[in-house]
């Protein structure tokens, strides 16, 4: 199975199990072998649960191989990895990438994990994320840097960097990811994968209310469009509809746009929260626009009537309040009082900004969010889709965005002497550094629109460059149909990084 494993996406592997051409145990053993071969290089998997997964594989086979395999879910027997942040797996440690949470073990599954299990996915480990998802790269002090299979000197992005690196390295065909500011789309762009952020409304109900602004959503990073479409059906679709039936997201991915109804597409070349776009990214945008035009769509340049400075400030205030919740009130989850040495200094400083500024400025930030959401909703009456960058530049090198020594000193001073003027200065400088590279995704978390990073370009050094698309909220099916059309026009499934090829 080792040599054939990479030829299939998750749906394809599940079909093999259903036809009894391979067993769930064989698939798991292959995934584990690939993990053991590649993870020492990429440091993507931070928790292993191999033995429990082997027992589940045997139960999956016993409960419904052959024609009855759908009784245990449409992805029965497919090996799967869950991000070590937010999505609780009962009985498995969830660290949030933080020293404070390193012993925290949830007792119940999160709603999305319940749906993963119902689909038959076999969870055998957890993937690395930046601490509390705060950074667009994955270099938590608790576990060390996660690396990009396309070039080990470069980041796989974040915060779902471990998920993307695992898929790009061929360990699994898709992996759980979440996105509160770009954390599905950024690592998908860095690792040459498909990354779909669904509409805010398409999330399973939970007893835990979402943080202010409801920025975050869960789904996956995948090698194929149809895998992400099925995942969206699993967590948000109508459970009464059979897999792939008309009206499902999988059905949308199976019926790509054919040119008979051209889309009106706005080409956005502005850097949004970033400063400038690199020539490589601008070239990828122009190339994508040309491809879309060749497919019959109408593409025209456009500049969004959005005050990006105001939007950026609102996003940061919402982000800081979330940091305060998970840092300064961590004892609500773990029962243990949080201490400074248990958190990275940037996370600790952001939490104090949330306490000092974020709570007070939260109503204004929510007002800005509502106004921008209305602006974009009005624009989407004119255009079907927005085409824009996922990142302002190709994947950066490991360590390039981490706080410098002088920045760390400033962050310590801010938490020791929480003066508003110093906090605002630190927040501006620290966010400038991250947004300069990863400032093109957050807008669609504010608005709740569906958006996706599609791997349409690679630069001269062999690093992937994703291109981002967004549609009106709730019109996820249209984006998936467009993605399927692009996937057929410029296939990426068989493009494999050097690390993967070296370990085949």
Image (spheres, helix red, strand yellow):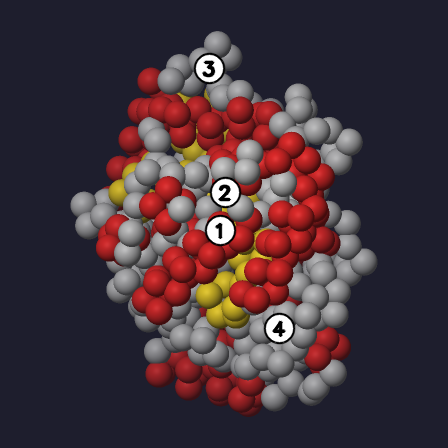
Residue highlighted by disc 3? 258
Q: Residue visible at 60% across and 54% down? A: 57
**Is 115 above or below relative to 207?**
above
Q: Is 57 or 291 nearer to us in this picture?
A: 57
Determine crowd level at label 1: few under 14, some 14-19, many 20+ residues with C-alpha closer than 10 A: some
Residue 380 in the image: state x and y as whole percent.
58, 29
Residue 91 in the image: state x and y as whole percent.
68, 70
**Spatial separation of the CA atoms under disc 1 and disc 4:** 26 Å
Q: Is residue 312 visible in this depiction of the protein?
A: no
Q: Residue visible at 63% across and 40% down? A: 65
Q: Which mark is residue 22?
A: 2
Q: Is residue 252 visible in this depiction of the protein?
A: yes
**Spatial separation of the CA atoms under disc 1 and disc 3:** 38 Å
Cβ atoms under marks 2 and 4 closer than 8 Å: no
Cβ atoms under marks 1 and 2 closer than 8 Å: yes
Q: Is 128 or 107 nearer to us in this picture?
A: 107
Which element is circle 4 on?
A: loop
**Spatial separation of the CA atoms under disc 1 and disc 2:** 6 Å
**Spatial separation of the CA atoms under disc 3 and disc 2:** 35 Å
Cβ atoms under marks 3 and 2 closer than 8 Å: no
Count of numbered circles in the view: 4
Q: Which mark is residue 93?
A: 4
**Is 203 above or below relative to 430?**
above
Determine crowd level at label 3: few under 14, some 14-19, many 20+ residues with C-alpha closer than 10 A: few
Q: Which mark is residue 43?
A: none
């Amino acid at each position: 199975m080792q040599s054939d494993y990479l030829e299939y996406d998750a749906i394809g592997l599940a079909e093999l199990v259903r036809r009894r051409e391979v067993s769930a145990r064989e698939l798991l053993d292959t995934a584990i072998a690939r993990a053991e071969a590649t993870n020492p290089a990429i440091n993507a998997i931070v928790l292993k649960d191999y033995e429990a997964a082997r027992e589940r594989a045997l139960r999956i086979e016993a409960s419904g191989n052959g024609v009855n395999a759908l009784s245990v879910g449409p992805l029965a027997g497919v090996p799967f990895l869950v991000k070590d942040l937010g999505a609780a797996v009962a009985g498995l440690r969830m660290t949030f990438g933080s020293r404070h949470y390193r012993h925290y073990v949830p007792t119940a599954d999160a709603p999305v994990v319940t749906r993963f299990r119902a689909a038959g996915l076999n969870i055998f480990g957890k993937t690395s994320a930046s601490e509390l998802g705060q950074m667009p790269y994955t270099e938590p002090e608790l576990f060390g840097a996660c690396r990009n299979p396309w070039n080990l000197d470069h980041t796989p992005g974040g915060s779902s960097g471990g998920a993307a690196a695992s898929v790009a390295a061929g360990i699994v065909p898709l992996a759980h990811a979440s996105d509160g500011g770009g954390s599905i789309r950024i690592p998908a762009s860095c690792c040459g994968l498909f990354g779909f952020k669904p509409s805010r409304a398409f999330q399973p109900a939970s007893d835990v209310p979402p943080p202010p602004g409801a920025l975050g959503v869960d789904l996956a990073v995948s090698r194929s469009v149809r895998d992400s479409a099925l995942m969206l059906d699993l967590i948000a679709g109508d459970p009464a509809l059979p897999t792939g039936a008309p009206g499902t997201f999988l059905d949308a991915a199976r019926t790509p746009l054919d040119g008979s109804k051209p889309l009106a597409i706005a080409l956005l070349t502005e850097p949004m929260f970033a400063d400038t776009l690199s020539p490589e990214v601008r070239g990828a945008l122009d190339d994508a626009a040309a491809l879309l035009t060749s497919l019959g769509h109408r593409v025209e340049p456009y500049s969004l009537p959005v005050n990006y400075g105001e939007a950026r400030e609102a996003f940061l205030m919402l982000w800081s309040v979330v940091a305060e919740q998970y840092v300064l009130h961590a004892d609500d989850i773990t029962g243990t009082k949080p201490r400074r040495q248990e958190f990275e200094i940037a996370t600790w400083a952001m939490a104090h900004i949330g306490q000092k500024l974020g709570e007070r400025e939260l109503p204004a930030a929510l007002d800005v969010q509502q106004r921008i959401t209305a602006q974009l909703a009005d624009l989407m009456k004119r255009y079907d889709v927005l085409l824009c960058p996922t990142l302002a530049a190709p994947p950066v090198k490991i360590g390039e965005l981490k706080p410098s020594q002088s920045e760390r000193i400033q962050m310590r001073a801010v938490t020791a002497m929480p003066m508003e003027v110093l906090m605002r200065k630190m927040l501006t400088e620290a966010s400038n550094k991250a947004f300069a590279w990863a400032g093109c995704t957050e807008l669609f978390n504010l608005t709740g629109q569906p958006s996706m990073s599609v791997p349409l370009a690679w630069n001269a050094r062999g690093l992937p460059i994703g291109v981002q698309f967004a549609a009106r909220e709730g019109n996820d099916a249209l984006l998936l149909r467009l993605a399927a059309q692009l996937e057929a026009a410029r296939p990426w499934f068989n493009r494999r990084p050097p690390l993967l090829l070296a370990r085949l």
